[in-house]
């Protein structure tokens, strides 16, 4: 091997090793969160492999960040997992679902969590950590707004799924389902990360990135559905492949939406080069990851 090629190989693999070491530290922090809030994380579906996958995803999507800088992204991703499991698998009536959502929105706005509710306690910890950052006093309302948008989307999907399983109503159209992609939670995680790492300067700056993130999130929804169809069928969950479109159409739609994402991101690259790279890496990493596996550990 030529000396220059050897040096390049060593440099490349050393960088991969460094990123993995960041992920290991992230996973250990997530294990600490699971130990602190055990009622939120049954095993399965939240096993060590899932925590590793969450930590690896953030480390490879934002390889310029330290483990400390990725803590909020990791913890918000884990909280979304807990909230998703609570609403999808544990709540049995609309009143309970709406009460849970209202409690989370209140805590995000500053209310104290209930003593017997680990979901809002974990959210309060995230909120309090973010409140110490320089940007949160100015941009925290956008963080709250996106949480509300995400949870409203979760409620909407809960109702669709309940109607489907009870045959009380027709299914949503594929376009309505995709428009509800905020329930995936990626944009809320992204806003949390950008605020935590001081990655934006103004509200307009963050809003422009969020608009692009919404389109990225739709692609993530599609590739997730392609990967999780069999699991969703067994669990009685909703999936775009159940809504009158076939796998080929969904794959083509994901490609078309990814192209639209690039059109939205290109003008932002001069002002927000690192955040544009971040969103592009979200697209690439997630598509690659879901090509071979899924986050959830279900037996």
Image (cartoon, helix red, strand yellow):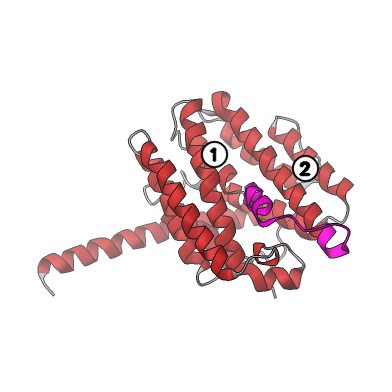
Disc 2 on helix, strand or loop? helix
Side (left or right) of 115 relative to 135? right
Left or right: residue 208 compared with residue 184: left
Task: Tell me, yes or no, whether the two marked residues, 2 and 1, touch with CB atoms within 8 Å.
Answer: no
Q: Is residue 37 visible?
A: no
Residue 187's x, y, as percent? 56, 44
| Helix, strand or loop: magenta stretch | helix
| Viewer-closest of 109 and 92 | 92
Magenta segment boundaries in residue numbering: 162-184
Q: Which residue is under mark 1? A: 191
Evaluate whether residue 289 shows in this view.
yes
Where residue 219 appears, as percent x and y from the top left, is 53, 55
Return the x and y of residue 14 as percentages of the image width and height.
29, 62
Identified at 54% across, 69% down, the residue is 248
Spatial CA span between label 2 and label 1: 19 Å
Q: Secondary structure at mark 1?
A: helix
User: Which label belongs to residue 83?
Assistant: none
Rendered residue at 46%/48% (across/down): 260
Q: Residue furthest top?
A: 138
* Residue at the spot of label 2: 101
177 is within the stretch colored magenta: yes
Residue at x 42% of width, y 51% of height: 280
């Amino acid at each position: 091997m030529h000396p220059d090629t050897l040096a390049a190989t060593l440099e490349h693999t050393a960088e991969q090793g460094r990123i993995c070491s960041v992920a290991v530290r992230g996973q250990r922090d997530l294990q600490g969160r699971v130990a602190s809030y055990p009622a939120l994380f049954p095993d399965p579906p939240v096993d060590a492999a899932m925590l590793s996958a969450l930590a690896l995803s953030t480390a490879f999507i934002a390889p310029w960040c330290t483990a400390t800088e990725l803590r909020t992204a990791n913890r918000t991703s884990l909280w979304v997992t807990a909230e998703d499991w609570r609403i999808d698998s544990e709540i049995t009536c609309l009143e309970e679902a709406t009460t849970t959502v209202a409690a989370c929105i209140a805590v995000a706005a500053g209310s104290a969590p209930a003593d017997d509710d680990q979901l809002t306690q974990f959210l309060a910890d995230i909120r309090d950590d973010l409140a110490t950052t320089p940007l949160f006093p100015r941009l925290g309302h956008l963080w709250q707004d996106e949480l509300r948008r995400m949870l409203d989307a979760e409620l909407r999907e809960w109702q669709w799924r309940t109607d489907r399983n009870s045959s009380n109503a027709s299914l949503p159209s594929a376009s309505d389902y995709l428009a509800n992609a905020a329930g995936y939670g990626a944009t809320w995680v992204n806003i949390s990360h950008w605020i935590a790492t001081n990655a934006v300067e103004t509200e307009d700056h963050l809003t422009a990135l969020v608009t692009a993130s919404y389109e990225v999130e739709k692609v993530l929804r599609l590739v997730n559905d392609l990967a999780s169809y069999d699991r969703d069928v067994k669990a009685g969950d909703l999936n775009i492949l159940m809504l009158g479109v076939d796998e080929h159409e969904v794959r083509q739609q994901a490609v078309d939406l990814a192209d639209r994402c690039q059109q939205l991101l290109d003008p932002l690259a001069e002002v927000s080069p690192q955040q544009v790279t971040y969103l592009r890496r979200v697209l690439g990493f997630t598509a690659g990851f879901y090509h071979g596996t899924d986050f959830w550990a279900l037996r």
